[in-house]
Image (cartoon, rainbow, N blue to C red):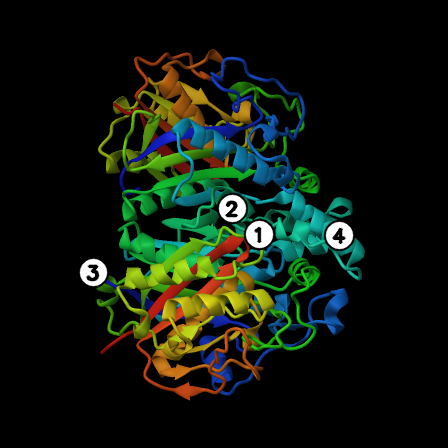
Amino acid sequence: MTPPEPIAITGMGAISAIGEDVVSNFRSLEQSRHGIGRITRLDTFHHDRLMAGEIGLSDKALYERLAIADHEAYTRSTLLALVAAKEALDMAGFDRHDGYRTGLISATTVGGMDATERYYDDYLSSAEHRHFIPTHPCGYGAEQMARYFGVNDFVTTISTACSSAANAIMLGGRMIRAGLLDRAIVGGADCLSKFTINGFNSLMIYSATHCRPFDGSRDGLNLGEAAAYLVLETAGLAARRPQKPLAYLSGYGNANDAFHQTASSDNGEGAYLAMKSALQVAALHPADIDYINAHGTATPNNDLTEGHALLRIYGSKDALPAFSSTKAFTGHTLAAAGAIEAVFSILALQHQVVFPNLNFSQPIASLDILPQTQLKHQQIDHVLSNSFGFGGNCTALLFSKAHD
Amino acid sequence: MTKPIYIHGSGSISIQPTHEPGYRFEAVKAYAQNPVPACDPDYKSLIPALQLRRMNKSMRMAIFASRLALQEAGKETVDAVITGTGLGCLSDSERFVETVLANEHELLNPTPFIQSTHNMAAAAIALSLGCKGYNMTYVNNASAFASALLDAGIYLAEHPDHTVLLGGVDELGARTPRFWELAGYLKHDNPVIPTPLAASSSPGEIAAEGASFFVASQQPTSQTLGKVIAGDTCYETADAVAFVNRFLRRYGLAAGDIDAVVLGYNGDIRYDAVYSTVGSTLFAALPHIGFKHIFGEYDTVAGAALHLALRLLGQQDIPQQLLLNGIRPRSLRRILIYTQRRGTNHGLILVEKEG
């Protein structure tokens, strides 16, 4: 099978607990500097009990950075999204009025829930914060972004739990390939909220300490907040500008585990099918992959079943390429995870480096697979990035190196 | 849109008895309240009781409507499930927020959290059908159904032999409609269904809920209800006539090539003028069909409009209560749906009778 024309990635932006832009995220990854700590900014009962990957900037500081007037209603996920998308757009540097069709495909699960939970009773008794009422729906943030950046050709939002941003990236690629868009700003954002922290805590998959992806003793995740966006373009359009693309989106696949609302099937069927389909779209073999940025949430169920799915793709643990989960750096950033990890995958391609899987000491007995625990320089041509969510939603993306 | 997609089955739950076999939109249920909950079918007739007990309203409406669509199409399962929802599983979201605010220090029941996830309806359908294929959920407010439809078109172009289930679902919450009331979205004065339109309209919309699902593929069969030729969306436009015109030109159509237009009048005097402008400027000689005055307003009500259009193509008749301008169609082969909500998320769907 001949691979179709790859999709050029010409810009990226990221903000997470380990950095307010792409460069600072890379420095933290390179220096094994995680961003997980006690919860300080969010007003929650759990602030001394649970750890999370918080971004140090207050909402007020984000308003200022983005030059948004105080009286306007922007929730934190959208503020983070604007910061990351702005970085991506500045890097891509295309002329927004050149007549090419540009779409905005965003992803979120929290949406405006942080405002809703803050003002849930207040809205009824006081008019002071009612201008935040319209911000609740998940689709509202992308509409604000569209207005902020002047994108109107196509605007949509995906919400498929923790695979949301990976699916947004996938849709961007598919729409470009289908000839419906020339360019797409794709990614996702989720801020921390009491809703999600209590949700994962109620499921008893929230670690009381630092999360330990793929470790035999792992006992749950840390949540984080982040936003990351990519600019995708047809290779032809990207070639008209002097700078070469950062990397290519070469494959994508989505499948459903159809097993349980939250737990993955024992053999990781959905994950397996998603990876297989991404490889097929890219016309690549498993052996072509040099690094896997795993979903690796550090919940007992995810890492076990993802490991099984990886072993099914590769046949044996000896055939597995270097893999790591970067969630011990950022926390699990839910809808943003697929996008922030897409940025990390592209950084791995650009710098030819595998990022370490922190906090690992012993393998999961039944899998006996070892993630990469130290920063490792090696040749990397293709990176596979996994994102799996509630409802059995499994997505795999493939990123490939831009050759000179 | 990519290529036309053929619809072989259509199932709908709404505030009208659309789930009843052979419903022809002749007897329209009247209401004098706001919001208006959907007419509940006998969910147990198609969903096992044990599963049903665990399902929230979005999940049960989506599963029931998709079962109706599958039955009509004579299909047991599909290759992919693509849904749209503006607000997802709103009641479970509210329930979990309320639990967190009241009892954050206690160990909480995770079920409403799990089931508040926006993709739960699509996931529940996949689980009930054992469908391991592509599964997607769009949440872009009043264009959520349009995005699902667009994705179905792309998916079927990528997989020409596959069949997809696509649809939209939205449920009413309890607290959220009070917030809408405070935000000025809802109609106070004489909130009735059927809602008076045009000269007798007033500010505000009537909030409702529902689910509409469709079985689609790229191949016509003897079951085919109709085909969706094209769709388009636009988040904001200063000139809706130009938006509709561009669409017609792109598909080489003149107004005379269309037999009827379905317009999203919801009786909100603040936003309905755009329909009269588009209707009178471009389609003055065509029958104008309303749907939100009988379905109420919610983000994915465009799915109910598609269901209605497919039924009208089948019955070749426009019931009196739906016809807004008294013009009877010469024939009903091609119907254009135009809708928007509160001035944003404009959407067009062009449906044609097959054969």
Q: Residue furthest left?
A: A2
Question: In terms of image quadrants, where is residue A398?
Answer: bottom left
- Dot 3: what SS? loop
Judge depth for marks 2 and 4 and give the one in front.
Answer: 2
**Callout 4: 10 Å neighbours few (<14), some, many (20+)?**
some
Which quadrant does the N terminus of chain A fall into? bottom left
Q: Are marks 2 and 1 in contact (CB under 8 Å)?
A: yes
**Callout 2: 10 Å neighbours few (<14), some, many (20+)?**
some
In the picture of the structure, the residue carrying the numbered disc 3 is A1
Q: Nearer the viewer, residue A220 or A368?
A: A368
Is disc 4 in the same subunit as disc 1? Answer: no
Q: Position of residue A203 (x, y in %)?
A: 67, 60
Q: Chain of mark 3?
A: A
Amino acid type at circle 3 is Met
Q: Is residue B287 above or below residue A11?
A: above
In the picture of the structure, the residue carrying the numbered disc 4 is B99
Q: CA distance from mark 2 to mark 1?
A: 8 Å
Q: Position of residue A160 (x, y in %)?
A: 50, 53
In the picture of the structure, the residue carrying the numbered disc 1 is A261
Is disc 3 in the same subunit as disc 4? Answer: no
Amino acid type at circle 1 is Gln
Q: Are marks 3 and 4 in contact (CB under 8 Å)?
A: no
Q: Chain of mark 4?
A: B
Judge depth for marks 4 and 1 and give the one in front.
Answer: 1
Is disc 3 in the same subunit as disc 1? Answer: yes
Q: Nearer the viewer, residue B187 or B115?
A: B115
Q: CA distance from mark 4 to mark 1?
A: 21 Å
- Dot 4: what SS? helix
Q: CA distance from mark 2 to mark 3?
A: 32 Å
Amino acid type at circle 2 is Leu
**Callout 1: 10 Å neighbours few (<14), some, many (20+)?**
many
Which quadrant does the C terminus of chain A fall into? bottom left
